[in-house]
Image (tube, rainbow, N blue to C red):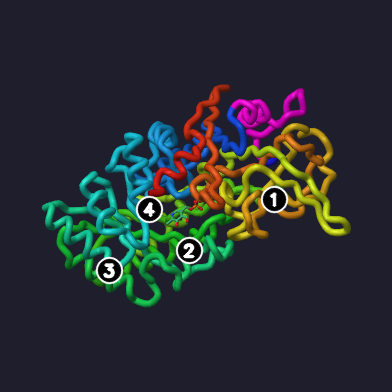
Amino acid sequence: MLHSNISVNEQGHLTFAGQDTVELAERFGTALYLLDEDRVRENCRKYTETMKRCFPEGSGPLYASKALCFKRLYKTLMEEDMSVDVVSGGELRTALAAGFPAERIYFHGNNKTVEEIHYAMDSGIGYFIVDNYDELHEISYYAREKGVKQKILLRLTVGIDPHTFEAVNTGKIDCQFGTAVETGQAIELVGDVLRTGGVELDGFHCHIGSQIFEWTPFRDAAVIMLDFMSEVYEEFGYKTRVLNMGGGFGVRYTEEDPHVDIPDSIERLAEFMRDECAKRSLTMPIVLMEPGRSIVADAGMTIYTAGGVKTIKDHKSYVAVDGGMADNPRYALYQSPYTAINAQRANDPADFLCTLAGRCCESGALIQENIMLARPNRGEKIAVFVTGAYNYSMASNYNRFCRPPLVMLHGGEAELAIRRETFEDMIACDL
Ligand SMILES: Cc1ncc(COP(=O)(O)O)c(C=O)c1O
């Protein structure tokens, strides 16, 4: 199977993290998100252990909450010694409500509101990752009013193309995030920061994109960042303490996707950075990374129930399931590839060419087009693999569908971590 946490039992049912997905679907209903906690931990350790070994003390991963955010997950992340990044007051409140230590939280985002800035600072968060000049002044103003020094990193745009989907290529020079190195605006911003009270500049951040399968785009970004650190030292005598290289390592959604050896890629990056720092007479900075997808994606699976199966004569066949774009908008957004299987007859030959459709009212509201399945009967369970990242966190109430529950699987136990949304929840804000 695509990942080692997926298998088939004697009944021919698909198993995930060692548990029968058909039984889980019967117990919790569908659509249903599953999350393999052991896999989340394993993925965290690829970063924590390697970064501890290869980079200076204080280095480590920040989990990018945007990939998947709910209270129970932060308990696992805490136990795995992860720090986290958040991009909104909502993600921040979730982490704090889970008891996540504020000083290990980094606040990202290209348009933090005044309320969010105040709330984050009042909560004692560790860092703001500052996107632009206006935001810098808002943070500085409130820090001076409070009489504190707020630690910050500056988000810079390095303008390299990591050859990924356009929609997740967020390091391009003309994107809406960060301040560009190439145009000279980043160095100007550093000058502003160093003249501004209330903030303490600890270093710089860049993020080049997502679903990246090679270490070389990170190497190219590191060259630009290290050159920038040298320039900043020459211009202002400022020594960079922290360098955050962002997130982005890819995951396997289908058999065609390559496998990324994350520890090996980090080791290569560390070795390269050590040499490049030496060449520039720079002290190796504390290095941070911001993995999201590669922590939770392959720890997730979604189970649906098949409804109607119909064939449009001389055209195509559809299998409609009880979910779709509202719980997984990624195919509708950018035609993301996925692997799906008839979970009830997982050993049967996949010989039925079909399109897996959801039930939202958009012709593009599909989960996957032209895939092979064992032809499902109405009521059989369908599993979609690798849905841990950017599924629940991107879910909506489009067509007023209730968001599915999320069940954490660990040590043979199944724990309800997010309950199914109810119609009462959905109309609670309607006056
Ligand atoms: C600034 C930043 N950091 C980290 C991430 C996480 O990326 P990934 O989930 O690909 O690891 C993103 C994703 O968009 C991002 O924009």
* Residue type highlighted by circle 3: Tyr
Q: Is the distance from the Cβ of mark 2 to the nearest ligand 1 atom less than 8 Å?
A: yes
Q: CA distance from mark 3 to mark 2?
A: 19 Å
* Residue type highlighted by circle 4: Val
- Examine the rendering and report whether any part of residue 154 can be seen: no
Q: In the image shown, does 42 or 396 lie closer to the viewer?
A: 396
Q: Check disc 4 and report its element: helix, strand or loop.
A: loop
10 Å crowding of disc 1: few (<14), some (14-19), many (20+): many
10 Å crowding of disc 3: few (<14), some (14-19), many (20+): some
Q: Check disc 3 and report its element: helix, strand or loop.
A: helix
Q: If you read the primary sequence from the N terminus, does the residue marked by circle 1 or circle 3 appear first?
A: 3
Q: In the image shown, does 423 or 75 lie closer to the viewer?
A: 423
Q: CA distance from mark 4 to mark 2?
A: 15 Å
Q: CA distance from mark 4 to mark 1?
A: 31 Å
Q: Check disc 1 and report its element: helix, strand or loop.
A: strand
Disc 4 target residue: 87
Against 77, residue 245 (above or below) is below
Circle nearer the viewer, 3 or 4: 4
Disc 2 target residue: 170
**Residue 99 in the image: x percent, y percent?**
32, 34
Q: In the image shown, does 91 or 275 lie closer to the viewer?
A: 91
Q: If you read the primary sequence from the N terminus, does the residue marked by circle 3 or circle 2 appear first?
A: 3
Q: Is the distance from the Cβ of mark 4 to the nearest ligand 1 atom less than 8 Å?
A: yes
Q: Which residues are magenta?
A: 3-27
Q: Looking at the image, do the residues carrying marks 3 and 4 touch, with CB atoms under 8 Å apart?
A: no
In the rendered image, residue 255 lying in the magenta stretch gets the answer: no
Against 285, residue 309 (above or below) is above
Disc 1 target residue: 357
Q: Is the distance from the Cβ of mark 3 to the nearest ligand 1 atom less than 8 Å?
A: no
